[in-house]
Amino acid sequence: MESVDGKFLLEGASVYFRKGSGSHEVLADIHISISKGEWIGIVGRNGSGKSTLAKVLSGSCPLSAGTIKQGWVNGRRIGMIGQQPDAQIVGETLYEDVCFLMENEAVEPAKMPDKAEQALSRVGLNLPLDHPVGELSGGQKQLLAVAGWLVTDTAVLVFDEATAMLDPASRLNVLHIAQELKRAGTTIIWITQWMEELAWADRVVALDRGKLVFDGTVPSFFYGEDVTAQDRDRSRENHSHADDVTPCQRLGYEQPYAVQVARSLRKRNIRLPSWPVTVEQLGEAVDNYGSTA
Ligand SMILES: Nc1ncnc2c1ncn2[C@@H]1O[C@H](COP(=O)(O)OP(=O)(O)OP(=O)(O)O)[C@@H](O)[C@H]1O
């Protein structure tokens, strides 16, 4: 276990912006602890403060009150990938773009081509270094932005609705790359409006009008009381909590299809052996149910 001092922590974090003669509270008294190598999914409706939280975590928005302790990040970088693929492009070619951060960090010029190639290959952009950035698709531009962070020692990558403008295949590709990075030890903060993307997270944090209204596991976000009830109710087979409103629904989001099906099955007392969020997970759960039933 990390010591408390070593934790990446937000404590009572608040951000106010000036509005007329008063102030507008965008983040209110947020407490979050982020573990090394964790994947945290952050959700909340438009204007709930997600981007502001992303900026606070990456150090680009100062707090009006409270504290941030970067603990185990320990001077390493916190990168951020935004929603607009074009907004984060800084070079004309892949090489120029991916070298931008290295130049800022005074990496030896002789080492740059190798580092650039390694970073591009890690994100699966296997194109010539002089390939024009203007010819990349939106999804490839997002991967290029990720590669830009990989040339330096990046401890945490914040994806702020980074897949919002992408087609389903590119979206999945960016998710896969983030998963690879997590396996290699990078901490992932994944902000999204797409509920199914939370399937990749270890934990969900939800914001509503600047307040933290949920911080828990993915199953408890989508299945609410059912999850805690499962243990409690093992001996009461006919009891079902499927009518309970889940944290996901309370936030005003539609539950993913797989969650709707699984909850509907639970109402009929068919309890799948896991808590599916994607259709693939639902298929696996049904398979496993079939083999144990
Ligand atoms: N620099 C700023 N000055 C004043 N108000 C701001 C500033 N930045 C954000 N806000 C306000 O803070 C609130 C939260 O904005 P933020 O972008 O963090 O929310 P969000 O959840 O990311 O929204 P979206 O999903 O629409 O991107 C909004 O009401 C926004 O208008």
Image: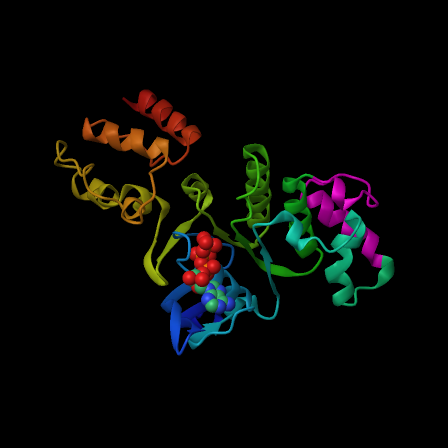
Is residue 132 magenta-colored?
yes
Q: Quadrant of the C terminus?
A: top left
In the drawing, does residue 151 fall left or right of residue 70? Answer: right
Q: Is residue 236 above or below residue 114?
A: above
Where is residue 173 drawn, in percent x and y? 59, 38
Left or right: 86, with 57 as reference point: right
The mark tally for this picture is: 0
Pick whichever, 288 or 199, lies toward us.
199
Q: Position of residue 284 (x, y in %)?
A: 40, 27
Residue 78 covered by magenta stretch = no
| Residue found at x 44% / y 68% | 9
Which quadrant of the rendered structure holds the N terminus?
bottom left
Q: Locate residue 80, reporting x and y percent.
A: 58, 57
Asked if residue 218 can be seen in this view, the reply is: yes
Name the image colouring.
Answer: rainbow
Residue 7, visible in the rendered structure: no
Would you say 125 lies left or right of 11 here? right
Tell whether 116 sits left or right of 198. right
Q: Quadrant of residue 268?
A: top left
Tell me which corner region of the image, top left, top right, bottom left or bottom right, holds residue 137: top right
In the rendered view, would you say 87 is above or below 72? above
Q: Nearer the viewer, residue 190 or 235?
A: 190
Q: Can you name the residue that lies furthest to the front here? A: 20
Q: Is residue 13 positioned above or below 173 on the image?
A: below
Residue 12 pos. (x, y %): 37, 72
Part of the protein shown in magenta: 111-136
At a point 63% along the width and 40% down the height, the residue shown is 139
Hey, which residue is sitting farthest right in the picture?
110
Q: Quadrant of residue 130?
A: top right
Residue at 56% across / 68% down in the picture?
60
- Residue at horizontal 69 percent and vertical 54 percent from the top: 148
